[in-house]
Structure formats: structure tokens, C-alpha cells
Image (cartoon, rainbow, N blue to C red):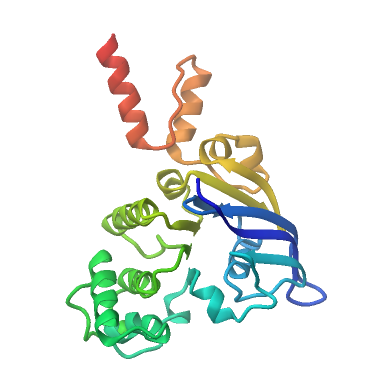
Amino acid sequence: MGEKIIEVKDVWFKYSEEVTALRGVSLEVTQGEKIALIGQNGSGKTTLAKHLNGLLKPTKGDVIVKGMNTKETPTHVITNIVGYVFQNPAHQIFTKSVYEEVAYGPRNQGLSKEEVDERVRMALELVDLSGYEDTHPYDLNYGQMKLLTIASIIAMQPEVYVLDEPTSGQDHMGRRKLVKLIDMLNREGKTVIVITHDMRFVAETSERTILMARGKIIGDGPTEEILTNTELLKQTAIKPPQVVQLCEGLRERGIELHALTIQEAREILRERLAAS
């Protein structure tokens, strides 16, 4: 694991006197982690995520990104380090072509036209949108629009990616594409934080899972520990992946099987059958 890249210190955040979204949240993120941020609607997930790149500033407490306090550092400096992909593409897309959307960030980073063109080409290729450069973003389907917003962040080459509900609107192929993309970014040393309600996607992509409820972190550990802790998940009405539920049912019948994904379960069963 790499160096500490983000530190959240006893952060409280109020949208108003009546609405407190975060209540004393503390955590550390190190370079190269794959993290899932889960919890029911209203638990504080997105509010916390928007603190990680300075879109929101703490009412109390501090967020430190690579030694810089987000309260004191211009947001554009932080967003070059922590890229945030919004849950709703319409909240992020604002240009008239796919090319312009992806090129906007690199241009603001002061890159040459040749460098911008190369960043755009590379990012669109990674999300399978090559050939759509002249297309208006709103002529894409919803799943493609989500991929476009991810491409626009990839083109800026941040050190941390925060993806808010990336599987929304994605079919099976889109989900597979996202799993591979997250793995590729992580192999390059990037930190990836995924906010999602999709527990199967959590099991497939994340090594660490942070569980939130009522503006607090109530669980933080290896994904397998969190997703198999049924009593903890019940506090937030979250159901573990179906494979985890199946394994739990089998153990109740005396069959020991521990797996987070279908692929893991298949491999374990194949090995057992081969050994029998």
C-alpha cells in the first residue's frame, strides 16, 4: 500500500441548522486503495465524497489532501488530484460535443493541443466511445453518458477517482467494462473510491468497504468482513450479494463455503470437485 493521500479528521457538515449530514467522520485513504462507500440514501455517502475534493468544506473538522487543507486550498487544485464523477451525468456535462467534454479538463490544466488530443483519444478508447467525438453528449444513451463523464475525469489523470453510482444505467456489458476499467486504473497506482448501492459490484471491485449510517461511519474494513457481517448490514437495511446469502444458507446446512462473487464460488467448487 502507498502513502497516505487523504485524511478526514472529525468532519461535521451541516446543510442547515436542521440538517446535519456528517457527524464526526474520520478516515484515511492511502494511495492505490480500492474502496467502496456504501449506505442507505441519506447516510452521508455523497456528502462525504464531495468533501474529498473540496466541492464541500467541513462545517467543523478538516480534510487534508496530499498535505493541503481543503478549507485553505483552491478547489481547482484539489480537483486535479481527486477527480469526482457525479451520480447524474446532467450535473457534469455542459459542452456540445463528446470531444469538447473530455478536452475541457486537460485544457484547463494548460496542456498543449497535442497533449489534449492524446488525452482525449486515450480516455475515449478506455470507455469504448472512440468515434463519438463529434456527437452531442445528450444524443448518447444514459449508460454512455455515464461513461463519458468518467472519460472526462480520466483525461485529467488525477491520483484519486471518486465514482458516484457508476453502474447506474449500465447493462451487463457496461458493468463488465467498469470492473475492468477500475482494475486497470488501480494497476496504474490510482486510488478508486466507488459510491454504490450495488453490492455485487462492491464485491467485484473493492478491497475495502466503508459503511455509513446517519452521517457516521459504522463499519470500515476488508470488503469480505463487511459484506459477510449480516448483523452490521441489517442496521442499514443493506442486503449482501446473493452469493454471500447463498453461502450463509449452505453453512447453516453444514456446507462450508465462503465467497463474495460467482467467480470465487465457481473456483472453490471446481477445486473441491477435482480433489474428491
Give x and y (percent) for residue 271.
Answer: 30, 19
Tell me: 184 left or right of 7: left
Residue extending farthest to the bottom is 96
Quadrant of residue 145 within the rendered picture:
bottom left
Residue extending farthest to the top is 276
218 w.r.t. 60: above or below = above
The C terminus is located in which quarter?
A: top left
Give x and y (percent) for residue 72.
Answer: 69, 78
- Residue found 47% across the figure and 56% down from its top: 191
Residue extending farthest to the right is 17
Q: Nearer the viewer, residue 16 or 181?
A: 181
Quadrant of residue 215 within the rendered picture:
bottom right
Q: Nearer the viewer, residue 165 or 190?
A: 190
Give x and y (percent) for residue 122.
Answer: 25, 70
Tell me: 18 left or right of 73: right
- Whether residue 211 appears in this view of the structure is yes
221 w.r.t. 252: above or below = below
- Whether residue 164 appears in this view of the structure is no
Give x and y (percent) for residue 248.
Answer: 51, 27
Q: Nearer the viewer, residue 167 or 162?
A: 162
Quadrant of residue 7 within the rendered picture:
bottom right
- Residue found 61% across the figure and 56% down from its top: 40
